[in-house]
Amino acid sequence: MNATLPCPCQERLPYSGLMWRFLWEYHLTVLRWARWARTEVEAWPEDLSRLDATTEFRKVVSAAVSLPDGTWQPEPRRRKGNPPLHSV
């Protein structure tokens, strides 16, 4: 392709940029959730019948913290000895 000619899809580049940013942000959100979910599951006892579902739900909801951009993410509960998760 001649470098002086415009890209045939040049008019779509702004839309492509928006889409890639969305996909990147979505990926980071899923990754953050997966790390949080892993620590939640690791903290569960072997016998899940020992958990009180209402109490556990309240813990998850109350652990939500606000982020600087106004969104929120759950604060992970860590078992003793688990290394901290790296932030995304």
Image: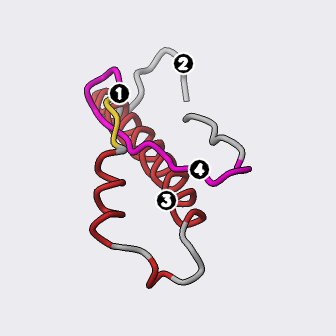
Specify whether residue 79 is painted magenta: yes
Give, as a three-letter code, the residue at label 3.
Ala
Residue 50 location, x and y as percent?
46, 80
Question: Which numbered disc flags the more N-terminal residue, 1 or 3?
Answer: 3
Q: Give the residues drawn in magenta, as a range.
A: 67-82
Name which quarter of the figure residue 55 lies in. bottom left
Residue 87 location, x and y as percent?
57, 34
Please tell me whether residue 80 belongs to the stretch shown in magenta.
yes
State the SS at label 3.
Answer: helix
Q: Which residue is mark 2?
A: 3
Gap in Å between the C-alphas at discs 3 and 2?
48 Å
Mark whose residue sits in front, 4 or 1: 4
Q: Nearer the viewer, residue 66 or 55?
A: 55
Judging depth in this view, the residue of 53 and 27 nearest the camera is: 53
Which amino acid type corresponds to the residue marked 4 in the rendered image? Arg
What residue did someone put label 3 on? 37
Report which quarter residue 15 is drawn in: top left
Count of all numbered marks drawn on residues in the image: 4
Residue for point 32% across, 33% down: 18
Sort mark 4 into few (<14), some (14-19) or many (20+) by Cα contacts within 10 Å.
Answer: some
Q: Which residue is mark 4?
A: 78
Q: Are marks 1 and 3 in contact (CB under 8 Å)?
A: no
* Residue at the image point whose x is 60% and y is 64% from the top: 42
